[in-house]
Image (tube, grey):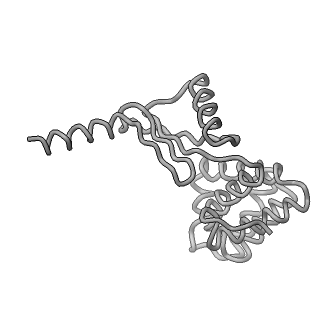
Amino acid sequence: MAAVDSSVSGVSGRYATALFELAREDKSIDAVKADLDRFDAMLADSPELARLVRSPVFSADTQAKALAAVLDKAGFGGTTAKFLKVLTANRRLFAVTEVIRAFRALVARFKGEVTAEVTVAETLNKKNLDALTTALKSVTGKDITLNVKVDPSIIGGLVVKLGSRMVDSSLRTKLNSIKHAMKEAG
């Protein structure tokens, strides 16, 4: 059984751990992760599907039938489809995005990868992404997966969250520091 950490807990963590163990036994971790990534993308692209998943208004039967149709049409099968149907039958489909997040964390830990949450003011080009990945890999000694978020409000620089550590080298933070220093000085 996979060891539980703070990023994988609660209902979503239990379901993600169960799915991870099944996928590991079937040697289908990558296939299940790819399916879950695809389902997550479908949720992001379809407000109707997101509503079906999150809304308690739909009965379990309606949700199950609709999800089965979506899974069939999208070509989902095997472990992932069965798992999503179990989530639906147990009335836990609303937690699927958190289950997917927790599953990704379990896969990353299993593969010895570390996920870095990076916030930048504007989109980074491939050269800068590669340089950042290399720098973070040299610090951690592990493979790095970057989750990059663009937030123009940081003005410039970047904010990196790696596990429990955070480095904020954004221009917004530096300007705020100067502002506070000037207030104290005078």
Placement of 28 over or under 9, stated as above or below = above
Placement of 145 over or under 5, stated as above or below = above
Report the residue at 85% width, 65% height from top. Answer: 22
Q: Indicate the position of residue 70 as horizontal and vertical percent values.
A: 74, 57
Placement of 156 over or under 50, stated as above or below = above
Q: Indicate the position of residue 52 as horizontal and vertical percent values.
A: 62, 64
Closer-to-camera residue (62/4): 4
Report the residue at 86% width, 59% height from top. Answer: 24
Q: Residue furthest left?
A: 186
- How many marks do you count on the picture? 0
Report the residue at 26% width, 41% height from top. Answer: 176
Q: Indicate the position of residue 121 as horizontal and vertical percent values.
A: 42, 33
Closer-to-camera residue (92/49): 92
Query: In this rendering, would 84 be left or right of 148?
Result: right
Closer-to-camera residue (133/121): 133
Which quadrant is the N terminus positioned in? bottom right
Report the residue at 78% width, 69% height from top. Answer: 18
Query: In this rendering, would 166 be left or right of 64?
Result: left
Q: Residue furthest right?
A: 26
Which quadrant is the C terminus positioned in? top left
Residue 2: which quarter of the image?
bottom right
Query: In this rendering, would 176 be left or right of 12?
Result: left
Q: Indicate the position of residue 132 as horizontal and vertical percent values.
A: 57, 31
Closer-to-camera residue (46/118): 118
